[in-house]
Image (cartoon, rainbow, N blue to C red):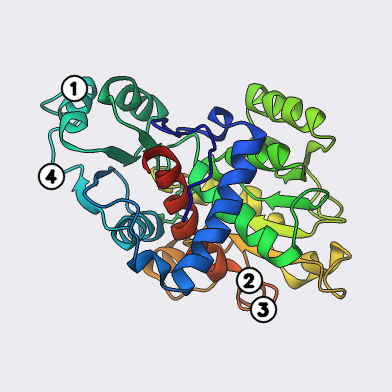
Amino acid sequence: MIVPQLGLSGKSLLKLADLTDQQVLGLVDFAIDLKARKAAHEHLDAPLLKGRNIALIFQKSSTRTRCATVVAVRDEGGSTEYLNQADIHLGKKETVKDTARVLGRLFDGILFRGFAHETVEELARFAGVPVWNGLTDLWHPTQILADLQTIKEYFGQVKGLKLAFIGDGRNNVCNSLMRGCAKAGMDMVDVCPPELAPDPALFAAAQADARRNGCTVSVSHDPINGVKGAHVLYTDVWASMGEESAFNQRLELLRPFQVTMDMARRTGNLESGRLIFLHCLPAFHNHDTDMSRECGALEVTDEVFEAPFSKVFEEAENRMHTIKAMILASLA
Ligand code: CP
Ligand code: NVA
């Protein structure tokens, strides 16, 4: 397989703003090719990461991002080492800068998940090898690559479609979606209560990308009319990792923003099959987990989550293909 020339060789990916519009779309197309290559078992004959070692530093829990990266790297003949906060000295006995300089001499790349976005920036500044952001409090760029892949696979295109994000309109996933949709030429509306509106500077930067691509990024505080015309309904948990104490307050603010079948119908695109539901996962869609029982907040009904137009498990699988595309673009 020929790795496309995306201009990302040796580069880190900390946020979507680090990529040109063409690089975002190129990574999505590359991931679609890699998915077909895996289905045809071609990766077994010519692995692209043979002899490469990737460190995975995780300060927060993860199912998808961690496993997607492990499988992506293993598929291509490389290996990974999982390091959680308790395993290593990072930030406790050793500075981020020193940790970066040590790990950069041992590994070919580092995927980081954590709290402060400055930590991943500091790692990237000093590691001397590519660093990829697997989620910080501010951004979740690899998630959006998988979202765009899922949208493209369903609709055959991304440009000209409209995505409505409903919920905590200033979290890492929403911040990244604003930017990713604008770069991909999709209209994006952030449907949220005024108290959870996006940071004005991040919103303005996404709008500038959108203007260049002839699409729009907007904010609506109206859960009834805000979703009209959407082809993608997207939500996320009402309180992100590290914000769990805010659940009660969020429950009050976000109750009218729950994604329901009524909301799906109000897009006007459900009946024609021109609507999909996405969620980065994990999702609170029933009371079958300890946390969802405890906090009582469900951002989406079970009916929507389990409906045929819900593509959340395709989206979860695509985390692997897009993370593979990103790592190969940096290293292969
Ligand atoms: N969507 C996502 O990042 O999932 P994990 O928290 O399981 O990695
Ligand atoms: N906003 C969520 C995303 C989880 C993948 C969080 O940060 O917890």
**Alpha-carbon distance for marks 1 and 4?**
15 Å
Q: Position of residue 129 (x, y in %)?
A: 30, 30
Q: Nearer the viewer, mark 2 or mark 1?
A: 1
**Contact, CB < 8 Å: mark 3 with mark 1?**
no
First along the sequence among labels 3 and 1: 1
The residue carrying mark 2 is 301
First along the sequence among labels 2 and 3: 2
Q: Position of residue 270 (x, y in %)?
A: 82, 71
The local secondary structure at tag 2 comes to loop
**Alpha-carbon distance for marks 3 and 4?**
41 Å
The residue carrying mark 1 is 95
The amino acid type, in three-letter code, at marker 2 is Thr
First along the sequence among labels 2 and 1: 1
Q: Based on the displayed image, in which of its 4 quarters is residue 72 positioned? A: bottom left
Query: Eyeballing the image, is 147 above or below 285?
Result: above
Q: For this view, does 56 lie left or right of residue 223?
A: left
The amino acid type, in three-letter code, at marker 1 is Thr
Q: Mark 2, residues whose alpha carbon is within 10 Å: few (<14), some, or many (≥20)?
A: some
Question: Is disc 2's CB within 8 Å of ligand 2?
Answer: no
Residue 284, can we see it? no
**Contact, CB < 8 Å: mark 2 with mark 4?**
no
Q: Mark 3, residues whose alpha carbon is within 10 Å: few (<14), some, or many (≥20)?
A: few
The residue carrying mark 4 is 87
Q: Nearer the viewer, mark 2 or mark 4?
A: 4
Count the marks. 4
